Image (cartoon, rainbow, N blue to C red):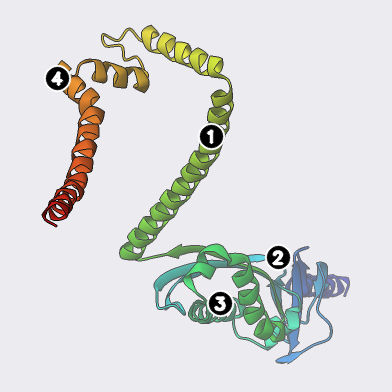
Amino acid sequence: MVQELLTAGAAVASGCFVYALAAARVIKQYERGVVFRLGRLSGRVRGPGFTMVVPGVDRLRKVNMQIVTLPVPAQDGITRDNVTVRVDAVIYFKVVDAANAVVQVEDYRFAVSQMAQTSLRSIIGKSDLDDLLSNREKLNQGLELMIDSPAIGWGVQIDRVEIKDVSLPETMKRSMARQAEADRERRARVINADAELQASKKLAEAAKEMSTQPAALQLRLLQTVVAVAAEKNSTLVLPFPVELLRFLERAQQPLPERAGAGREPEVSERQQVARAGAAVEPDATGGHEAGAGEHGS
């Protein structure tokens, strides 16, 4: 009798031990447990730690609540200004409602990935190339809103979406490089022109000041001569006054030319006398004829 009781007790204990092993579940800190009893969602979501389920009746499904980093495959698209680009992104999300993540969607990871791809293609078509290259933060926010709206119903929260890279065709890269080079050259020319304008203003002020001080001009001339001589050049160029050159040119002219140039006023005086005599001759002739008439009478 005692032996039978011991055997029965051992069997019950073994059965309880096996049942406990089958019913015992351990949920980690970053997980939540969703229990289905006979196919229906049962009670509240189980938190981290030790929990029990009914073997054969309950089924526990664990859901990871950590932030998931999901790369979005590169998508080809045409921007609003008709440029073909290839854009890839990365999305950060986490489950905030374990029950909806299990019940409302078959595979929330795959669903979020597909939604991110379609939203990325849509945002490419609505944006210009300049926005994709320089205004990514705004595009990231718009992409996050597009994905987050349907994801809320799945128990998923989108933390952040970032565009990683924008690939352009080689022809477009060369065109942009030429444009950037032309822009840099334009800025360099503007800077040089401004510098020359300022230098010309300062030079004009210096010339005005030197014109009032001849000694300053001579000092500047001596400084220039010293600077040129210090370079050990075989040829030394010195400035020469223009007035002195004109004096030497007049001194080298032939004497007849200079004499003729001096007699020009005398010739003109003789011409004036001759013209005066020619004007007097008709009056004298008329006078003689008048005298003859008086005689005849």
Closer to the eye: label 1 or 2: 1
- How crowded pointer 2 is (Cα within 10 Å; few <14, some 14-19, many 20+) is rated as few
Badge 1 vs badge 3, beta-carbon distance below 8 Å: no
Looking at the image, how many numbered discs can be counted on the residues?
Answer: 4
| Amino acid bearing label 2 | Gln
The residues tagged by marks 1 and 3 sit, at their Cα atoms, a distance apart of: 66 Å
Identify the residue at horizontal 48%, vertical 62% (top origin). 165
| Residue 236 screen position, x and y as percent | 30, 11
Q: CA distance from mark 1 to mark 2?
A: 73 Å
Q: At label 1, which amino acid type do we have?
A: Ala
In terms of sequence position, does the residue under pointer 4 or pointer 1 come before the other? 1
Q: Of all residues shown, which one is farthest toward the front?
A: 297
- Quickly name the residue at label 4: 256
Q: Which residue is mark 1?
A: 204
User: What residue is shown with label 3?
Assistant: 116
Direction from residue 193 to residue 228 in the image, left or right: left
Q: Residue at x 50, y 74 (%)?
A: 128
Q: Residue sitting at 38 percent across and 56 percent down?
A: 177
Q: Which corner quadrant holds the C terminus?
A: bottom left
* Amino acid beneath label 4: Pro
Q: How far separated are the C-alphas under marks 3 and 4?
A: 104 Å
Q: Can you give x and y, in whole percent of width and height, for residue 255 in the image? A: 16, 16
Q: Is residue 244 above or below residue 128?
A: above
Amino acid type, mark 3: Ala
Check disc 2 and report the residue beneath it. 66
